[in-house]
Amino acid sequence: MTRKQKKVLYRIIIAAVLIAVIVLLPVEGIAKLLLFLVPYLVIGYDILRKAALGIVHGEVFDENFLMTVATIGAMCLGEYTEGVAVMLFYQIGELFQSYAVGKSRRNISALMDIRPDYANIEVEGILEQVDPDEVEVGSMIVIKPGERVPLDGIVTEGSSTLNTSALTGESVPREIHAGEDIISGCINMTGLLHVQTTKGFEESTVAKILDLVENSSMKKAKTENFISRFARYYTPFVCYSALALALLPPVISLLMGNPADFPEWIKRALTFLVISCPCAVVISIPLSFFGGIGGASAKGILVKGSSYLELLSKAKYMVFDKTGTLTEGVFRVTKTVPEDISKEELLYYAASAECYSDHPIAKSLREACDREVQRDQVTDYTELGGMGICAKVEGHVVYAGNDKLMKEQHISYRPVTETGTVVYVSADGKYAGAVVISDVVKRNAKRAIAGLKAAGVNKTVMLTGDRKEVAKEVALQLGLDEVHSELLPADKVDCVERLLKEKNEKECLAFVGDGINDAPVLTRADIGIAMGAMGSDAAIEAADIVLMDDDPSKISLAMQISRKTLGIVYQNIIFALSVKFGCLILGALGIANMWMAIFADVGVMVIAVLNATRTLKVKESQDQGLYACEE
């Protein structure tokens, strides 16, 4: 509890004790009024001050004005207990609201804490701490165990374990080694790292995350905008209605020759004012969206505004890029087919033949080989354009390449039909086997598609510039509904345009991508979702939602958070307005008293706020491995 909240709590306790004591005292008249003014001012002086300032600045019609008029009116009518009680319970409601907002903000603040305080620069053998803003691109920084990574870069020396939970929401540490990319915001847990920076602080991952979070409240959902407009017109309407209720019935009664009974109608008007206060709706709706964004951020899902959280609940078309989104985006050996030699020997021949190449295929062969490739054992290295490589490996003449190379060398080989890039290998003129290299499907990709279909997505589509055979194989493996291959960036936009025309107006289309060529499609879709950990800057800038750990299964979690948030928003609207309008009618008829008015205002607000805080609660089901929202 904050210092401000404690202060309000102490005032509530003092006022409650004073009311209890005064009620027991045998006093009447002016003495009783003066005694009740003490707890009234203790609990309500800030409300009275805000109401006065609102009148001075021309912003009259707000909840502070309603509470001030209603309570002062009640005191003037001699209902001292009710007048002070209205202010007391209103402050209790405000305390609940403050606590709920604080709880939501703590999730956001956990992200804000990722901003690094300093970076270590080595100057003449001594480490100096400097502001990350002052570090130039290409500089060498040192990150000690326990320190936060201040800037994006490449590890040049050392290995360690990184805590990425503040960025991704995942508690499992990640290993990092020399030659690998490292992003700012993580915590270095074990080893000493030397990192060459690749971006300035303003362009770093941590700076962009902070900017996204800080600006998320600027983009309001349609429901939020509706409630803001509703409150703008609703509050003046009920004030004038209360005034009419206080004056018209007694005046009409007088004209008809009956007693006016002004005190009774003024009492009804004051009750009407207390009941009409729109706090429950005005407070709980933004709080629900804020809680949804906070709950999502705690799971590594950054939503740039409540409008996108609302749109995501309506997503019925989910379109994916392939490479880096549904697949790892890196080549790996997925199958070996040795012929009369061992698997290890086949990989050694292939990796040795490719030892001087920087091509991703060559790197994947070297990574798959268990034996260390000795370059001094590789001679007569020759690249054969469009076919492969010839080299002598420990005295053996090795050819490694495509089927054209085998035919060119008149080597009888066994064709491999596996999807991917096939490297055929021969040694001393004899066929040695084949190695299949392909882009590996992400571990959670299949679960992601299944989760989206379970969430009510009507169509899942994959767009890729890759070959038709490869795309078809990935789509079949993941259970996608539709696939389009061999596309240029402009072709992807055309496909999305066609799908946008196909869906109805109430449905939304989301596109998920990670590459710079995905930025135009992310912008064109109703909702753009980018892979944040290794995604391009352009894709992250263009997207509306960013997944910080590149896990596509988080999309279904985001949809569940979105739908739960919208459900709670509608529950609060229906509940609050139903109780309000019901009690308003009872108040106008003289059936509802000031105590019922207190429940209609403060009670409804507390219930709505507590309901709104449920958007913060998100958990991952350990039994099924699927994401769920707590009820």
Image (cartoon, rainbow, N blue to C red):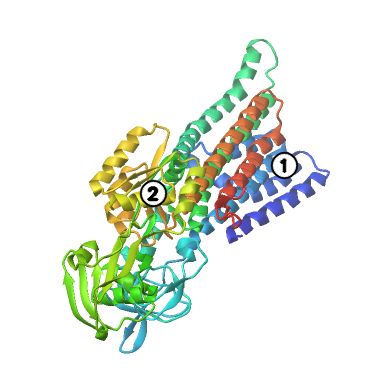
Q: Position of residue 65 (x, y in %)?
A: 55, 39
Mark 1, other Cα within 10 Å: few <14 / some 14–19 / many ≥20 = some
In the image, what residue type sits under mark 1? Leu
Q: Position of residue 90 (x, y in %)?
A: 63, 44
Q: Position of residue 143 (x, y in %)?
A: 40, 78
Asked whether residue 342 is in view, the answer is yes
Mark 2, other Cα within 10 Å: few <14 / some 14–19 / many ≥20 = many
For the N terminus, give its image quadrant. Answer: bottom right
Which image quadrant is residue 51 in? top right
Residue at the extreme top of the image, as rendered: 256
Lateral position of residue 329 relative to residue 109, left or right: left
Residue that appears at 64% across and 25% down: 585
Above or below residue 72? Residue 513 is below
Which residue in the structure is indicated by mark 2? 475
Residue 484 vs residue 425, the one in the foreground: 425
Asked whether residue 135 is in view, the answer is no
Which residue in the structure is indicated by mark 1? 33
Q: Secondary structure at mark 1?
A: helix
Residue 49 vs residue 616, the one in the foreground: 616
Residue at the extreme left of the image, as rendered: 385
Dots 2, 1 in contact, CB < 8 A: no
Residue that appears at 39% across and 62% down: 533
Lateral position of residue 566 relative to residue 580, left or right: left
